Image (cartoon, coloured by chain):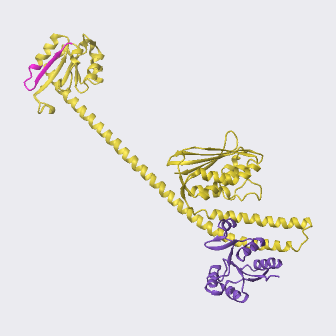
Amino acid sequence: MSEKKKILIVDDEEDFGKMVKLNLERTGEFEVRAETRGSNALNAANEFKPDLIFLDVIMPDVDGGEVMSQLKADKQFQDIPVVFLTAIITDKEASSQDGVVAGRPFLAKPITTAKLISCINTYLK
Amino acid sequence: MTNSKKLSFMADKNTIKVLLIEDNLQIAELIRDMLRRSSTVAYEVSHEINLTSALRDISPASADIIALDLTLPDSQGFQTFFSVRASAPDIPVIILTGTDDEEMAVQAVREGAQDYLVKSRIDMYVLWRSIQYSIERHRIERALRRAMDELDQRVKERTAELTMANNELQKEIEERVSAQSQLVQAAKMEVVGRLASGVAHEVRNPLAIILQGIEYLSGLVDLSNEDVASTIRSISKAVVRADTIVNGLLDFSRISRLESKACDIVPVIESGLLLIKHQCDLRHVKVVKNFASDIPRVTIDRNKIEQVLVNLCMNALDAMSSGGVLKVGASAVGTATGSAVCVEISDTGPGISPQNMDKIFDPFFTTKRSGSGTGLGLSIVKSIVEMHKGSIQIKNRAEGGAAVTMLLPV
C-alpha cells in the first residue's frame, strides 16, 4: 500500500476546510490538515510536511499572497506545489489559462472533490 | 435750375458720351443742339436710328448714358428698353417718350430706367440735369449694389466661419460629454468590480461549503432512494445556478479591460459560429452567412467581440427552439462620424414583445424561464460594444423574428 499524499489546506472558511478534509480523506489516498489562519500556515507546513498546499487568497490576518512569499522564502518548501483557491475568479478564467493565473496555479471556488483530486494528481505525478 | 454746378462724378471728366437712339431725325437734331449748347460739359453724341445697329458695339466705353426712344423701326414699347438693359446693364438709360406713351415710360423707370423725358416738352436745362443726375444716380446705385454684394459675401463668409466654429464647438462638447461619460462609466465599472468581487467572495465561499457538503453526504445516504437522490441533485443544481449568476456578475465587472488589435471581423464571426454549430444542429437551425468582400479591418478585443457574437447567436437560437434560419451578415457602412463595420444577426423566431423592447439591455432582465438565463448576457453585450465605441440595436423584423445590428467603428 502506497503512502498517503499529505495535503495542507489553508482557508479561513473553517467549514470548507473541514469538508475538503472529509471528502479527500474518505478516498483513502490523502491525509489532510486544514488550517484557518494564514499566520499559522508556515508553522502548520513545518509540522505537517505537506506534499501539496491549497491556499485561500483572501484571508483576514495574512492573505494567501503573503503566505506564499513566506513559504517560498523557506528552502524546504520551495519545491512544494502551492495551488491557490479563490472565489473571485471564475472557473472559466482559471481554466482558460490552464489553471495558471499570473504565473500561479489557481482553482475557482466552489469546486468539486474530483477537480481537487485531478489537480493534486497533476502536480504530484 | 442750371447746370452751373458740376456733379461729383464729373470732377475729373468734362465729356459725357451720349448714345442717342431715336428714329425721328428732327427730335435727334433738337437734342443734339441742346447738348451742344452746354458751356460746362462737352457732350459727345452718337446717334442711331434703330435698335439693332445701336446695340451692335455698345459698351460702357462707348457711352456714358443712353437716351432711348421706345418706338423704333425694329423694336417697340417695353421690349426696346428690356433689350437695351440686357445688352448694356452698366449704362444708365433715359427714356424719350411721346405724350401718348408716357405711362409706358413711367413703367420703364420702375423697371430700372433712370428718368424719362416727354419729347414735346424737352427743356435744355432739364435735359442736362436729367443726364447728369441719371449718371450720378446710376453710379451710386452700382456702388450700393457692389457694397451690398460685398456685404452679402462677407455675411456668407462670416456665417460659414461661425458655422465651422459652431461645429468645432459642438464636436468639442460631444467629445467632452463622451469623455465624461467614459469617466463615469469607468467609475461605475470600478464600483461594480468591487461589488462583484465582494459578492463573489461572500456567496461562492458558502457555495463551496455546500458543494463539498453535498459530496460528503452523498457518500453517507442511500442514493437508491429516489427522493434522497433527487434532493441531492436539486441542491447541486441550485449551487450551480447561484454560481452561474455570480460568474455572470464577475464577467460583467471585468469588461472594462479591452485588449484590442486590428483584425478582420469575418474570421471572428466564423469562430463564434463554430462554437454554436452543435447547438444549431440540435435545434435544426440553418445558418445563412452573407459577408461583403470589402470589409475594412476593425480594432477590437477579439475574444470579447466573439463573446458578444456567441451571446447574440445563442439568444437567436433560444428563440428558435423548433428550427428556423439564423442569418449572419457583415458589411462596411458609413455613419455620421465616419465608417464602420456592420454585423447583422437575425432569427426567424417570434420576435420581442413591445413591452420588453425597452428593457432588453437592462442588467438582470431576462425572458427566459427561471434558471435558464442570468439576465446579464445582453447588458454585457451592450457594455462590450460601447467600450469599442460601437452601438447595438435590436428590432423586430417585418417578416417576423428579431434582428440585431451592431456597428463597430473603423
Front in this rendered view, residue B336 or A62: A62
Occupied quadrant, residue A109: bottom right
Bounds of the magenta segment: B35-49
Task: Residue B120: give x, y in percent of width and height.
Answer: 19, 13
Residue B126 can be seen, yes or no? no
* Image quadrant occupied by the N terminus of chain B: top left
The residue sitting at 76% across, 65% down in the picture is B240
Front in this rendered view, residue A63 or B61: A63
On the rendered structure, is B378 left or right of B162?
right
Occupied quadrant, residue A94: bottom right
Front in this rendered view, residue B380 or A111: A111
Task: Residue B356: give x, y in percent of width and height.
Answer: 69, 50
Chain A rendering hue: purple
Residue B40 within the segment the image draws in magenta: yes
The residue sitting at 34% across, 42% down in the picture is B155
Chain B rendering hue: yellow
